[in-house]
Image (cartoon, rainbow, N blue to C red):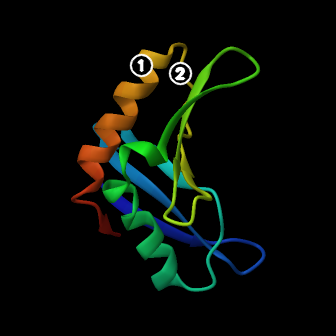
Amino acid sequence: MRILIDRDSNGHYRWRLVRRTPHGADVLARGVRGYPDERSCQDAAGLVGRASGEAMLIVQRSDGHWQWAISGPDGERLAESPAIFTDAAACGRALEDLRRASNGARTG
């Protein structure tokens, strides 16, 4: 898994955790806020693998589908799933898979 960092139109840095597949790549997680510099952005992405269970939420959307979110140490939302899930169990499995995989993420 790789941490990809881009600069948005406002000059803030934003991160995505991406895993290569035989057919391209999947975005597994994305940061929900911008950062003033690349280093702080990279540090924020690294928090995903160290997040406590209390910081991880499975949220039902108004359309009945599910999405996960992770809060940072400050209690503010840090990351969310780009994928939408049809049931809470699948969403929870995806979140746990991300947590395990993100411990070895590298910048790229």
The image quarter in which residue 22 lies: top left
Q: Which of 67 and 15 is in front in this view?
A: 67
Q: In this view, does 13 lie to the left or right of 50?
A: right
The residue lying at 46 percent from left, 84 percent from top is: 39
Q: Do the residues labelled 1 and 2 touch (CB within 8 Å)?
A: yes
Q: Is residue 58 left or right of residue 9?
A: left
Residue under label 2: 85
Q: Residue 53 location in percent, x, y?
A: 37, 43
Q: Residue 16 location in percent, x, y?
A: 49, 57
Q: Which label is found at residue 24?
A: none
Looking at the rendered structure, the kind of residue marked 2 is Phe
Q: In this view, does 90 lie to the left or right of 20?
A: right
Looking at the rendered structure, the kind of residue marked 1 is Ala
Residue under label 1: 90
The residue lying at 56 percent from left, 66 percent from top is: 74
The image quarter in which residue 35 lies: bottom right
Question: Is disc 2 placed on a helix, strand or loop?
Answer: loop
Q: Which circle's residue, 1 or 2, is located before the other in the chain?
A: 2
Where is 96 relative to 76, above or below? above
- The quadrant the C terminus occupies is bottom left
The image quarter in which residue 82 lies: top right
Task: Measure the alpha-carbon separation of dots 1 and 2.
Answer: 7 Å
